[in-house]
Amino acid sequence: HAGASIASNFLVTLAKMGVACLVQGGLSPAEAKQGLVSLMQGTLNNLSELSPEGALTGPIVRGDLVTVSRHLEALEQLPHLLPAYLALGRLTADLAWEAGPLETEEYQKMVEVLEKGGFSNGKSDSSHPEGKKETG
């Protein structure tokens, strides 16, 4: 039952968190919800065809430290969401590392960024060596 609650109830909670972030960024609640439902439906479609490891996308699995640091900066405006982002980010990094897309060094750097709340200066920094990483 816990697994079902995590997958179902927490999906709704994650949607609420995502809406809050997008509204903070300037979208209306309706626009935010519409965009997220479409994105989440695509993810669920991927999960119906692929393993969780295969369906994983986003900046953590790409090793995109700059984007993750920018997320952490943005969440300064919504500090009640930060603990969930950090916890889920760490679990996502673990999944990406175990599945193979994230190499050990990238994984260690990602964990460090998540634990420190950003690069060592606490903010994203385009002059940081990882700021030059291709994210395409």
Image: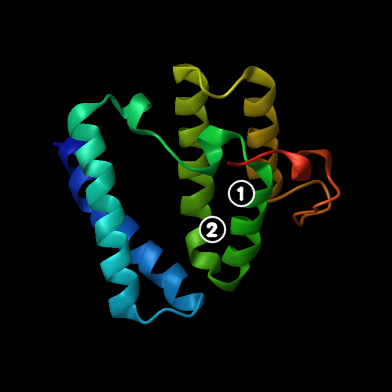
Q: Does residue 5 lie above or below 16 as drawn?
A: above
Image position, residue 33 (x, y; %): 29, 69
SS under mark 1: helix
Task: Mark 1 vs mark 2: give the one in front.
Answer: 1
Which residue corresponds to the image point at 38% horizontal and 63% vertical from the top-left? 17
Q: Which is nearer the eye, 54 or 84?
A: 54
Q: Earlier in the sequence, mark 1 or mark 2?
A: 1
Which residue corresponds to the image point at 82% horizontal and 46% vertical from the top-left? 120
* Residue type (three-letter) at the residue carrying disc 2: Leu
Image position, residue 71 (x, y; %): 59, 57
* Residue type (three-letter) at the residue carrying disc 1: Val
SS under mark 2: helix
Does 72 sit left or right of 6 as displayed?
right
Tell me which corner region of the image, top left, top right, bottom left or bottom right, holds residue 52: top left
Q: Residues within 10 Å of mark 2 (few under 14, many from 20)?
A: some
Tell me which corner region of the image, top left, top right, bottom left or bottom right, holds residue 102: top right
Q: Does residue 12 lie above or below 47 as drawn?
A: below
